Image (cartoon, helix red, strand yellow):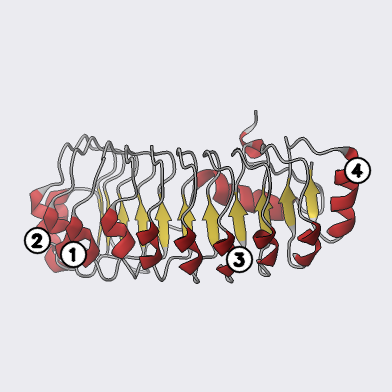
């Protein structure tokens, strides 16, 4: 299967640029990791240490590190720290001392947990933990009120804790390709949430509280075990993109027509009869629907 089909969207001549751009975000999980203007990137610890408090961006990707270099603790002005693709077993408690840290990338590491001191990172906004070995959402993350982006794709997470409600500022949560069987009722308290990606899990339904996500624009639920889509989803008035592909859905709610802003709906791989396909098209005349 071509990568562009993985989450159920195709394109036509009129929508190709829109869908292609959407796919780039879905498939790569790319949140713009661009440095602020005039910020120097350091790829060696010794060079960053020489720069002292002037070192704001350190990227140590794929350097065979089994532990976080202790010399980094000297960098009090650190804004961005990248440790992706290293064989890190643990993260030291002093990670919480980086008072200015805004972006932390720990993706593609064998981490199974994070220190509680992480919650002291009061300015942290973007956190990458994709392709690690987490079996649960690290508790400290749920107490980080400043976080706006969280990527936990491709871990071994089985459940999402009710304490996720503590992430009051989060706008984008990625939990694709885990083993999640249900979402907590408390997810409805994430009123700032705009994008929720939970594709390729083991969901069978959604909590009714999801209708409280008034800012939600993108909802990805592809490749789960959802047989009945709750009416509460149709109360998401700002929803633009809904991916339900490869779920055992045979029909959608009569209230689907209430999704007036919906522009992309994927139902690829769903066992919908022809009569239901015609009904959905009539309910959503302005939506690009893929069956």
Q: Give the total of numbered labels.
A: 4
For the residues labelled 3 and 1, the Cα–Cα distance comes to 37 Å
Residue at figure coordinates x 66%, y 64% from the top left = 239
Location of residue 186 in the rendering, given as x and y in whole percent from the top left corner? 45, 62
Residue, far top = 1
Q: Nearer the viewer, mark 1 or mark 2?
A: 1
Disc assigned to residue 211:
3
Which quarter of the rendered picture does the N terminus lie within? top right
Alpha carbons under labels 1 and 2: distance apart: 9 Å
Q: Which residue is mark 1?
A: 98
Q: Quadrant of residue 56?
A: bottom left
Q: Nearer the viewer, mark 1 or mark 4?
A: 4
Q: Residue at x 49, y 49 (%)?
A: 29
* Residue 273 screen position, x and y as percent: 85, 38
Mark 1 element type: loop
- Looking at this view, is 109 or 249 the one in front? 249
Give the residue at mark 2: 74
Residue receiving disc 4: 275
Nearer the N terminus, badge 1 or badge 2? 2
Mark 1 and mark 4: span between their CA atoms? 58 Å
Give the image quarter of residue 165.
bottom left
Who comes first in sequence, dot 3 or dot 4? 3
10 Å neighbourhood of mark 1: few (<14), some, or many (≥20)? many
Position of 2 with respect to 58 (left or right) is right
On the question of residue 83 being in view, the answer is: yes
- How many C-alpha atoms fall within 10 Å of the one at disc 3: few (<14), some, or many (≥20)? some
Is 39 located above or below residue 63 in the figure?
Answer: below
């Amino acid at each position: 299967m071509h990568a562009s089909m993985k989450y159920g969207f195709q394109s036509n001549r009129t929508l190709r640029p829109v869908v292609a751009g959407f796919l780039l975000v879905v498939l790569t999980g790319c949140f713009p990791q661009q440095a602020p203007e005039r910020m120097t990137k350091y790829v060696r610890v010794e060079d960053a240490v020489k720069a002292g408090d002037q070192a704001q961006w350190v990227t140590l990707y794929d350097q065979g590190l089994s532990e976080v270099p202790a010399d980094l603790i000297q960098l009090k002005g650190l804004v961005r720290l990248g440790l992706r693709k290293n064989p890190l077993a643990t993260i030291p408690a002093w990670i919480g001392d980086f008072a200015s840290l805004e972006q932390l990338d720990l993706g593609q590491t064998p981490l199974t947990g994070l220190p509680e001191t992480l919650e002291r990172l009061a300015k942290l906004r973007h956190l990458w933990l994709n392709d690690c070995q987490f079996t649960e959402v690290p508790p400290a993350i749920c107490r980080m009120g400043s976080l706006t982006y969280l990527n936990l794709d491709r871990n071994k997470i089985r459940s999402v804790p009710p304490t996720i409600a503590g992430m009051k500022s989060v706008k984008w949560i990625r939990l694709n390709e885990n083993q999640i069987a249900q979402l907590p009722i408390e997810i409805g308290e994430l009123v700032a949430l705009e994008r929720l990606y939970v594709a390729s899990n083991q969901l069978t339904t959604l909590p009714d509280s999801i209708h409280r996500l008034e800012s939600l624009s993108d909802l990805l639920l592809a490749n789960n075990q959802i047989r009945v889509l709750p009416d509460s989803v149709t109360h998401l008035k700002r929803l633009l993109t809904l991916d339900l592909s490869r779920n055992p859905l045979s029909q959608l709610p009569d209230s689907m027509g209430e999704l007036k802003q919906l522009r992309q709906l994927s139902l690829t791989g769903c066992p919908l009869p022809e009569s239901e396909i015609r009904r959905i098209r009539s309910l959503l005349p302005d939506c690009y629907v893929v069956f």
